[in-house]
Amino acid sequence: MGDKIKINGISIAPDEHKLVNLRIARLPTHTNIDLPVHVIRGPEPGPVLLLTAGLHGDEVNGIEIVRRMISANLLRPAAGTVLAMPIVNVYGFLQNARYLPDGKDLNRSFPGSRQGSLARRVAWNLMNHVVPLADVGVDFHTGGASLHNHPHIRCVMSIPRNRELAAAFAPECVLNAKMIDKSFRKAAHKAGKHIIVFEGGESLRFHEESIQAGMAGTLRLMRYLNMISELPGSATMSVAAAVPGTGSGSPQGQDQTLMNMTAVGTDTPGTGTGTGTGIRTVTGAPVTHFFTGSSWIRARFSGLYRGSVNAGDWIKKGQLLGTITDPFGESEYHLKAPSSGFVVSVNRMPVVNMGDAIIHVARKSGGTAVGSD
Ligand SMILES: [Zn+2]
């Protein structure tokens, strides 16, 4: 990217940080709705990293990850530019809702249209004003209602640049995930941009471990892209953890992240992520496991579900995963693992119906690529 970055007629010079508002629409109440984009430029030229969150308006962990990093000044690069959008679906966010007021899923409305419905207008603005400026991106999501995701990255692992970005982000888990029609990830891919998806926690609930994992991964990615020369030390992360109103969670969890963040200093080729492709990774990051496929374990009976495993657990074939009991005390069903694997998501709703998805298990070989962001 050259010396000039212009978005919606506003120029941002090197070493400048501006908040640019894209006008989307006017509500029936005459309230104008804008789409805010932070444009944070470093003094030196370099890649442009796009961070988007809140495409689903109730997925607050991603919103908090981007917000906290802006507040703690962690997105100011030494080289290149960060485009940070903490809330893309501002309408859904206002209503604590996944979708827009017209019931449309923004992440199934791409590439959008200038004159279409609200969802398509938001998509059009993102694709036409923001995406053309970006080189790569991370789109932050969470599990749906009552579905808790262990923090992980989703990408198409057969696309080398996708896998490389995922390895640089270095989460504990990378899940092979095909691109869905009309999703932001697919539309950006068609425009020649590589977007990986972060998932962590569930909608409408803060999950501190996911927030920390998202922040740490984003910093590792910025380091890999040579946007920052080293990962922030414990002092910087303490500032991040101390940002007011963050509900900073358990000090223990933060200490663990501090260890991961500070055990840095050398870039070791081809180690740490198990890719064997010579990708530069950062010592101290969690070991990254790449999963080719996954499947859902579903409830065979309706009743009250009590889980015995957590997201992030490794399970063995035949292991007890939980019980479904008849609320009238007539029967009890023991849920056993049909195969070994890694638990990516768990249901947190105690009342389940026959066929409901309960546990999402990832495998290192076989299985089918997941199909949603
Ligand atoms: Zn989502």
Image: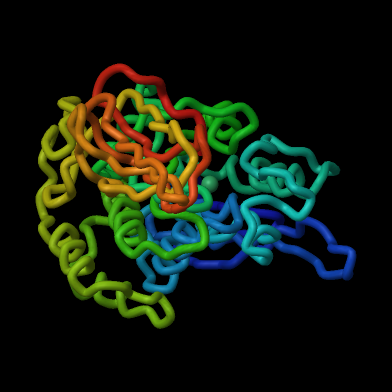
Measured from the top left, where is residue 121 in percent x and y?
76, 46
Q: How is the image coloured?
A: rainbow
For this rendering, which residue is in front, 11 or 306? 306
Which corner quadrant of the image does residue 369 belong to?
top left
Q: In the rendered image of this protein, does residue 134 appear above or below residue 364?
A: below
Decide if residue 172 is on the left or right side of residue 97: left
Which corner quadrant of the image does residue 364 belong to?
top left
Numbered disc total: 0
Residue, x 33% and y 75% (percent of image)? 248
For this rendering, which residue is in front, 93 or 329? 329
Farthest-out residue, top = 366
For this rendering, which residue is in front, 26 or 142? 142
Residue, x 27% and y 31% (percent of image)? 337
Measured from the top left, where is residue 185 in percent x and y?
53, 35
Farthest-out residue, bottom = 244
Measured from the top left, where is residue 117 in percent x and y?
82, 45
Q: Is residue 144 visible?
A: yes
Q: Is residue 50 visible?
A: no
Residue, x 32% and y 79% (percent of image)? 242
Measured from the top left, where is residue 228 in percent x and y?
29, 56
Residue, x 15% and y 26% (percent of image)? 276
Q: In the rendered image of this protein, does residue 94 appear above or below residue 292?
A: below
